[in-house]
């Protein structure tokens, strides 16, 4: 099954994608995580992407599209995937559509996460990441164990100013994709507010309804 997660920054896409892909045994493909890995390794793509990411702007389509096309064609993605953070522009969505149509493997459904702006700013600025395990924590909502506190890092784009730029970009360029997909597949709108377990249960209900779980 091929599932796309669309939602504003900090709406819980990564958190829920990790939970659901563990159950479905398919890869979690996060464009943001992939780009951050390239930045950390200092590759050419990483250096190009970093300038945009730091400012909360979208990385140019041509850089991101090739990266994701290569990833979805890898062997572990043949049974499906959850795409988290891609597509983010109409051009990305069209290219993905074309690539999947060429392989005869359409998108099964889109999950649209809905979270109010105030909550987004709070969640993003209090997010912390464990570089050793990749686990996402939150100092208010999902506190890490004390013994690992020192090794946790904060994303460079998780300050209030950059989060509000990311939110603006989301509204301008990504939110319209929900309508694009409504004409092509099933879109489930899920409230991203609630406990992690409640949201996961709603998500799994939608996937069951869709026949993807
Ligand atoms: P990306 O990494 O995709 O960031 P994003 O979309 O802004 O989303 P986030 O990762 O910030 O949030 P999330 O929804 O995954 O939430 P999470 O689960 O972590 O992209 C970063 C940048 O890369 C972009 O700005 C752009 O520059 C570039 N980029 C990436 N893809 C691109 C593309 N396709 N095209 C162009 N550029 C691209 O949760 C957030 C926090 O909230 C955590 O602390 C978590 O613990 C907490 N939380 C989660 N759920 C709950 C809950 N139910 N209650 C309370 N707290 C919760
Ligand atoms: Mg994320």
Image (cartoon, rainbow, N blue to C red):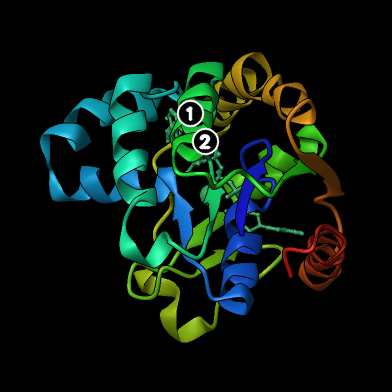
Q: What x and y, as percent, mark residue 149?
A: 45, 74
Name the residue rendered at 66%, 62% in the picture.
16
Number of marks present in the image shown: 2
Q: What x and y, as percent, mark residue 131?
A: 34, 67
Q: Is residue 75 above or below residue 123?
A: below
| Residue identifier under label 1 | 98
| Residue identifier under label 2 | 101
Q: Is residue 9 visible?
A: yes
Q: Secondary structure at mark 2?
A: helix
Mark 1, Cα crowd under 10 Å, few <14 / some 14-19 / many 20+, is few
Q: Is residue 154 left or right of residue 190?
A: left
Q: What x and y, as percent, mark residue 195?
A: 83, 67
Q: What x and y, as percent, mark residue 197?
A: 80, 73
Contact (Cβ within 8 Å) of mark 1 with mark 2 = yes
In front here: 30 or 164? 30
Q: Quadrant of the N terminus?
A: bottom right
Name the residue rendered at 80%, 51% in the picture.
192
Q: Is residue 169 above or below residue 8?
A: above
Q: Which mark is residue 25?
A: none
Q: Secondary structure at mark 1?
A: helix
Q: Quadrant of the C terminus?
A: bottom right
In front here: 166 or 75? 75
Query: Which quadrant would residue 43 be assigned to in this image?
Result: top left
Disc 1 to disc 2, C-alpha distance: 5 Å
Name the residue rendered at 47%, 65% in the picture.
27
In front here: 115 or 80? 80
């Amino acid at each position: 099954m091929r599932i796309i997660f669309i939602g504003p920054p900090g709406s819980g896409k990564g958190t829920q994608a990790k939970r659901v892909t563990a159950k479905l045994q398919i890869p979690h493909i996060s464009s943001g995580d992939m780009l951050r890995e390239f930045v950390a390794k200092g590759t050419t793509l990483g250096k190009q992407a970093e300038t945009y990411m730091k400012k909360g702007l979208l990385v140019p389509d041509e850089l991101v599209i090739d990266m994701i096309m290569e990833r979805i064609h890898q062997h572990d993605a043949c049974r499906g995937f959850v795409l988290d953070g891609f597509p983010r522009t109409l051009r990305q969505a069209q290219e993905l559509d074309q690539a999947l149509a060429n392989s005869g493997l359409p998108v099964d459904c889109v999950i649209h996460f809905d979270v109010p702006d105030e909550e987004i700013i709070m969640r993003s600025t209090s997010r912390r990441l464990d570089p050793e395990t990749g686990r996402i924590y939150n100092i208010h909502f999902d506190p890490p164990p004390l013994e690992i506190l020192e090794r946790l890092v904060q994303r460079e784009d998780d300050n209030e100013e950059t989060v509000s730029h990311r939110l603006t970009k989301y509204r301008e360029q990504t939110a319209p994709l929900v309508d694009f997909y409504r004409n092509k597949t099933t879109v489930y709108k899920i409230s991203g507010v609630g406990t992690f377990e409640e949201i996961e249960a709603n998500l799994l209900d939608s996937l069951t309804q869709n026949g993807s779980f």
